[in-house]
Amino acid sequence: MNKIPEVNYLNADRGIKSWLFTLDHKRIGLLYLFSIMAAFLLGGVFAILIRLELLGPGKDIMEARTYNQIFTLHGAVMIFLFIIPSIPASLGNFILPQMIGAKDVAFPRLNLLSWWIYMFGAIFAVISMSAGSVDTGWTFYTPYSTTTSTSVVAMTLGIFILGFSSIFTGLNFIVTIHKMRAPGQTWFRLPLFVWGLYATAIIQVLATPVLGITVLLLILERVAGIGIFDPAMGGDPVLFQHFFWFYSHPAVYIMILPGMGIISELISTFSQKKIFGYKAIAFSSLAIAFISFLVWGHHMFVSGQSQLASAIFSFLTFLVGIPSGIKIFNWLATLYKGKIRFDTPMLYAFSFLFLFTIGGLTGMFLGTLATDVHLHDTYFVVAHFHFVMVGGTVMAFFGGLHYWWPKFWGRMYNEIWAKISIAFTFVGFNITFLSQFLLGAKGMPRRYYSYLEQFQSLHGFSSFGSWIMAVGFIIMAIYLIYAVFKGPPAGDNPWGALTFEWRTTSPPPKENFKETPTLTHGPYDYDKIIPKRTI
C-alpha cells in the first residue's frame, strides 16, 4: 500500500496565511468546501427549525413573523451559498485541472479572488438577513419585497456580490478547459465531469448577470422609487418574476449539470465498464444548458401570461426532459452486465438515479398546464424541488465527495459507517418529502405558518423523516473528519479509475504532476485496460 507522500499541497506551506492567500487550485477548492459545508450546516439548522414548527397547526416554537424569516434564511442560504457553488466551486476547483492534466486553472489569482468575493458576499448576506429580519422568501417577489420594512436592500446587495464569484469561476473554467488540456486529450477524450462543468460555466457566465441586474433594479426600486415594478408608476410586478426566473431556472442546471457529470464518473468506475453513449451524454449537457434559458415561464402559468406563452413554455419544459432522459438511459445501459461494486460513492449514484428520476417525472405534472393550476404553490412543488435539488445535486455532491475524499487527503474513510450514513439519509429523505407530495396533492399551500388539522399527520411524518436524515448527515461529518486524521492510507488509485487525477499521488503534489502527462487512452476504456486498485 502506498504511503502518504511527504511533500504535497497540504504541507508544502503551513499556516493560516498560506491558505488564505494561496494560488493553488486544490487549496482554494478545499476553502470553498469548508465554506459551503458551513452554509449547509446553517441551512440545515433552519430546515430542522421549520419542521419543528410545522409539527402541529398554530404556534409550536416560534411566531409567524419569525417563521417567515427562518424559511427565507433556509432557502437563501441553501440556494445561493450551498447548492449553486457546491460542486463547481469546491469539487470542480479541486479536480478539474487534474482531470485535464494541467498544473492549475488558467487564472489562479482570479480563482482566489472568486473565493474571497464568495466569503464577503456570504457574510454580508447572512448578517443582513439575520439582523434585518428579511421575510420575503428566497425569490424576493415584488410587490412585497419593495414595500416591506426589512433589509431587502442589504440582502439583495449580498446576492449581487455573490454573483461575481460565480461569473469569475465560470470564466476561469471555460478558459482552462479550452487552453490547458494535456497532450492527447481531445474534446471527446474529456471526462464527462469536465463536460458538465463546461456546460455549467456557460450558464454561469450568461445567466448570472441577469440576476445581478434584477436585484440591482430591485434595490433601485426601493431606494430611488424608479417604478419599474410599481403599477402606480406604470411598472409591472410580474416583470420581476420574468427577470428572476430567466436566471433562476438556468441556475437549477448550474446545480444539477456538474452533479450529472459526477454520476457519469461513478457509474463507469464502479461498474468497470466503458460509458455507454459518451457523445450523447456530452452533447446532452450542452442541450440542457441551451434549453434551460427557454423554460422560465413555466414558473408563471398562473401569473396571467397569455395562453399561447404558457403553451410554448409547457412544450419547452417537456423538451428539456429529453436530454435528461438520454443521460438516465445511458447510465442504465452502462450498468448493464457491468462488474458493479457497491462502494459508498456508487450507493450515492444509485440514490441519485432513483430520487432524481422521481424529481424529473413529478416535474412533468408541474409542466402540464391543467395540473399546475391545482399544484402551483403547494407542497407538491416543495417536494419536487427537493427531489431534484437534494435527491439530485446533493446526492451527487456527496457521491463525488466520497469518491475524491481519498484524493483530497490520502486517507480512506470507514466504509461501514459511510453505508450506515447513506441509509439514514436515503430513508429520512424519502419519509420527509414523499409525504409532502401527498400534502400538495391534497391542497396544502407551501410557506404557510399554520394549517388545517387534517394535514397534521403528514406534517408530523415529514418532520420525523427530517430528523432521520439529520442523523445521517451527522454520522457522515464524524467519519469524514476522523478519516482526515486517523484514516488508513488510501494509495494513489483506491477505486481503480482511469481518469488523470488517479495517475498522480494522493494527496497530489503542489502542481499536480511531476511532469506533464500524456493521454494514451480514453477516460472510460475499461474494455481495453484493467486499472490496478491500491486499496
Image (cartoon, grey):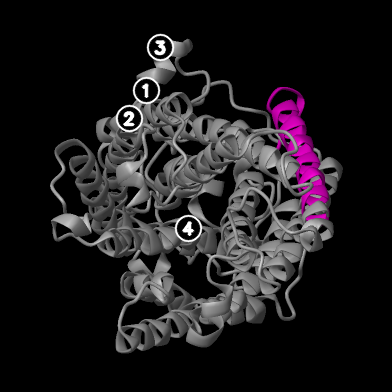
Q: Which residue is mark 4?
A: 258
Disc 1, disc 2: CB below 8 Å? yes
Q: Which residue is mark 2?
A: 112
Chain-order first, disc 1 or disc 2: 1
Residue 396 shown in magenta? no
Residue 246 shown left or right of residue 389 in the figure: left
Q: Tell me the element at label 4.
A: helix
* Tag shown at residue 22: 1
Chain-order first, disc 3 or disc 4: 3
Residue occupying image coordinates x 64% and y 73%: 357
Q: Vertically, is 291 above or below 221?
A: below
Mark 2: amino acid: Leu
The one of 407 and 290 positioned closer to us in this rendering: 290
Residue occupying image coordinates x 43% and y 62%: 253
Q: Position of residue 374 (x, y in %)?
A: 57, 78
* Residue bounds of the magenta highlight: 461-490
Residue occupying image coordinates x 60% and y 82%: 329
Mark 4: amino acid: Pro
Q: Vertically, is 221 above or below 203?
A: above
Q: Tell me the element at label 3.
A: helix
